[in-house]
Amino acid sequence: MHPDLLPTLAAVPLFANIPQPELVKLAALARQENYPKHAEIMAEGDRSSGLYILLSGKVKVVLRSEEGKEIILAILNPTEFFGEMALLDDAPRSADIVAMASTTVLLIAKQEFKSWLQRQPEMAFVIIKTLAQRLREADQKIGDLALMDVYGRVARTLKGLAKPDIQGRMVVSENLSQQSLADIVGASREMVSRTLKDLSQVGHIWFDGKEIIINERAERI
Amino acid sequence: MHPDLLPTLAAVPLFANIPQPELVKLAALARQENYPKHAEIMAEGDRSSGLYILLSGKVKVVLRSEEGKEIILAILNPTEFFGEMALLDDAPRSADIVAMASTTVLLIAKQEFKSWLQRQPEMAFVIIKTLAQRLREADQKIGDLALMDVYGRVARTLKGLAKPDIQGRMVVSENLSQQSLADIVGASREMVSRTLKDLSQVGHIWFDGKEIIINERAERI
DNA sequence: AAGAGTCTGTGAACTAGTTCACAACCGCAG
DNA sequence: CTGCGGTTGTGAACTAGTTCACAGACTCTT
């Protein structure tokens, strides 16, 4: 077991309210796995292997068409979990999980997790909240795809990805390629390129090296 | 209280495993409400009022753009519930609920529901499963919108709506207008009209009065 | 520092889907 | 039966977005 696993576990929202000694037991039972960039952590159609907790790195949840087009459903960061859905309803996975950087995950076996869920009803609530949150975001994305044009989707996505930096500016730092952004908004890479140009010409965004700064004063970016 | 409420309640999946006497208490606490066709049961931005259980009728969950375009996120039928999301995370509603026919709902107050959830952990599991199911469907819809053309989306949607009838044929009976179908797949009414024509010309579907029969033998409808 | 691979910008042709406009149709209230 | 609101079919013009093609910029690696 990795030495600093325990403090990391304590920071996972899913394990909030779980007493320290219990976490130690969990850490002993769980397995750590490492994946290089671009590795497929789970593939569509897989039967569930367990609950994954992202310890470091970054993963994307994607769907792919036969022609190779892909859409990113979500990007997950450390302390977030995935794999719970297939776990809970025993249906095969419906999306792929791909490492966007070198990442390590903690894998909790299905049975292990289920018995935990029974003993720690608090965890069930965290899961409910997370699922509700994700469903809300998914519904919004459906709305965006059906009701907005590419310009609007790109603008909204940037806003969603931005986090305040030290100077209080809203910054998208992710080091996100135009292709990834295109896969998030469901548009072609070229279209995203043109849209970013437009947005920066109107003054809604500007570039600082690899980062994108967002002008919050524009109400309708 | 409506006389045959109790048997109806017993059929609600959310209340599976809840002992009869408890259900009686619940029925006493809950309120019934009626809505005519087209009525807005909940509007976007509302604060949560409680958990709604659909007793009879049919509702749609929709998002609307400023220009009046709308996309149907889901259609709910009796025994299904809604309103749980705003309830659980206290965020304002993100979609509208509109009656598609004359409908009656059972409204359980927020506090009521929450204390139930505490006392009946079984209910939490049902909710988790339902949310997981809905999230799965939402993700699929995102994939459809981003990766398929209108033809594919209409075909898939029809398949999803179809239910086997007495003769074992897969039938969409819902009495669904082309406009509604268009709002489900995220396309224009005209496009749906043309697509249905195509699908029936190729022999993937055909019409029997108001019903649409789906040819299952076509693997790739 | 050179070369390979990846990412970005942009013009031009193309196409899926929208929008508009209108005729025909259906079902039902009076 | 008659008329009227909602639904459907279809042509034609238009447009947002895709696809293709290619040039330039950037960034690793060795």
Image: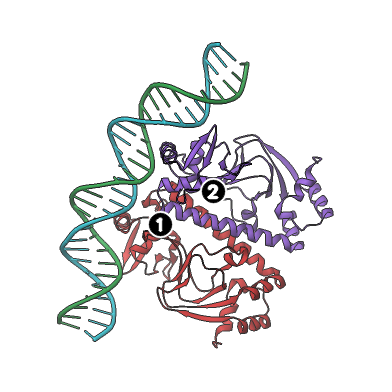
Chain colours: A purple, B red, C cyan, D green
Determine which of the numbered discs, if any, sits on residue A210 in the image.
none
Instruction: Write down the chain letter for disc 1.
Output: B
Determine which of the numbered discs, if any, sits on residue B185 in the image.
1
Answer yes or no: are tags 1 and 2 on the same subunit.
no
Please tell me how crowded label 2 is: few (under 14), some (14-19), or many (20+) other residues with Cα within 10 Å.
few
Residue type for callout 2: Gly
Q: Secondary structure at mark 1?
A: helix
Q: Would you say residue B134 is visible in this rendering?
A: yes
- Res B135 quadrant in image: bottom right
Of tags 1 and 2, the one toward the viewer is 2
Instruction: Write down the chain letter for disc 2.
Output: A
In the figure, B91 relative to A168: above or below? Answer: below
Position of B98 with respect to A59 (left or right) is left
Which one is in front, A43 or B14? B14
Residue B112 spot, x, y in % from top left: 65, 76
Which one is in front, A134 or A163? A163
Total count of labels: 2
Which residue corresponds to the image point at 68% horizontal and 59% vertical from the top-left?
A: A126
- Res B63 quadrant in image: bottom left
Residue B129 spot, x, y in % from top left: 61, 62
Position of A79 with respect to A161 (left or right) is right
Residue type for callout 1: Val
- In the picture, the quarter occupied by the N terminus of chain B is bottom right
Q: Secondary structure at mark 2?
A: helix
- Res D6 quadrant in image: bottom left
Which residue corresponds to the image point at 40% horizontal and 65% vertical from the top-left?
A: B171
In the figure, A145 relative to B86: above or below? Answer: above
Quote the CA–CA distance across marks 1 and 2: 25 Å
Determine which of the numbered discs, if any, sits on residue A160 in the image.
2
Residue D20 spot, x, y in % from top left: 36, 31
